[in-house]
Amino acid sequence: MTCKNGAENCGVFGNVNSSYVKFVHSYLNITCESGAVNVGGIVGWGAADNRDCPFSYMDDCSYSGTLTLNGCSSYFGGLCGFTDWMQFQNCANYGNIIINGDGGSHVGGIVAVTDQSTFPGMKHCLNVGTISGTASYVGALVGEIIQYNLAEASWNFWMDGSAPCADSNKETATFMNTFKVSADELANGYVCERLNKNLAENHWYQVAGDAYPRLYNSESEMGSQDQRGEVLITSASQLSSNASDSVEGQNIENLIDKNPESFWHTDWHGQCQDANHYLQVALNSVFTGQITMEMTRRKSGDDHPTGITVYGSTDGENFTEITQLTLPFEGQGTVVSALFNVSGVKYLRFTVTNCGGNNYGFRTFWHAAEFQLYGNNENAIEDIKTVSPVVKGIYNLNGQRVNKAVKGLYIIDGKKVMVK
Ligand SMILES: [Ca+2]
């Protein structure tokens, strides 16, 4: 979705008033251009002015898309842009918010701003998505809380590094009952257990290997991350490199084992002559469409890729540049690249051109704990569109519908049938 100048109150729901928004999981990628106002991954503008229903509620909702702001000014949130009298409970932002240019006034992982009427509160919410770039009021949970007299707040968590703070009003930080947690605490179940604390039933779920809790109470309801697109790396045999380290690069399958502890490292023993260490992916089929790259960083201080040039090839021999990706480095965690378009490509090469870390700059070698690509293959969608719908009923060979097949050849429910 693209919101241009003049677009106001945009999301899955643009404008919500005295309403319940429940069980909505948005994977929308949203790009906002200058002049767009009040944009959220789920709700653009949430309020309540009906006396019989003095609050709006958002419960058990999540956002997993990418929200990109290009020179925007006001009110952008992972779940909700602007709100007045809306309460948030069991909500999660997993999506990344990228602020380009002059960053706008208010940006929040859950909600950008709670306006001058009373904010009725936030309970059991989580932000792990990264907000990168600058704006006047940036918060992992709320950009700015303006009034909060009635607010109820408990057990709200945000990942260290996902944003500069939980909410930009320092005086509300304690009141908001927010907790900054590490990637370790997210991965080891500590946060999941507390998100479920004092709830009548569990709303949050996590299995070993998950980097963070998810908003479902059983595995069958959990769905999959595949909704971000088709998982394009399904086997380690698709992965190769010019620079696997002789010691720590032997197990390239570590990149897709869903274990944040296991990693793959490019050559740091001086054996690779090529200064451009790449990871190559052989796609399962020729691909045309949009792709995003997701990388989970290893628990280590340095050599985390922040600049990657992507090359594509049809034959695995001749590569041409497709795009250059920039990834934030703000500690550990999972980072997602911007979407990029590829056309008729079978092989992709990810050449790391820059790294971030605590002590060193770019040293040619790099490492990652997990690496995955998600894609929306336009050809696959085309295939589905061209399948003819089955016409129910009984038709003769002239295409006329009949009540009953007597004798001869008929088309019954789309299949040719000989009736004897
Ligand atoms: Ca791994």
Image (spheres, rainbow, N blue to C red):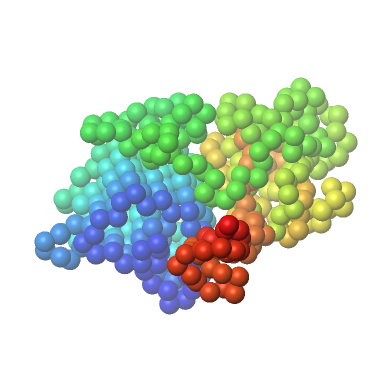
What x and y, as percent, mark residue 19? 24, 59
Q: Residue at x 32, y 37 (%)?
A: 203
Query: Which corner quadrant holds the C terminus?
Result: bottom right
- Work out whether residue 285 can be spotted: yes
Horizontally, residue 323 falls left or right of residue 174, namely: right
34 up-or-down from 163: above or below: below
Horizontally, residue 122 falls left or right of residue 344, namely: left
Q: Residue at x 34, y 49 (%)?
A: 23
Which residue is most to the top?
247
Count of marks overlaid on the render: 0
Q: Quadrant of residue 378?
A: bottom right
Viewer-proximal residue, 374 or 223?
223
Horizontally, residue 408 falls left or right of residue 349, namely: left
285 up-or-down from 213: above or below: below
378 up-or-down from 266: above or below: below
What x and y, as percent, mark residue 360? 67, 36
Viewer-proximal residue, 172 or 124?
124
What x and y, as percent, mark residue 157? 36, 39
Horizontally, residue 320 falls left or right of residue 391, namely: right
Q: Residue at x 64, y 57 (%)?
A: 380
- Work out whether residue 112 can be spotted: no
251 up-or-down from 47: above or below: above
Which residue is most to the bottom?
6
What x and y, as percent, mark residue 310? 73, 51
Q: Residue at x 41, y 44 (%)?
A: 127
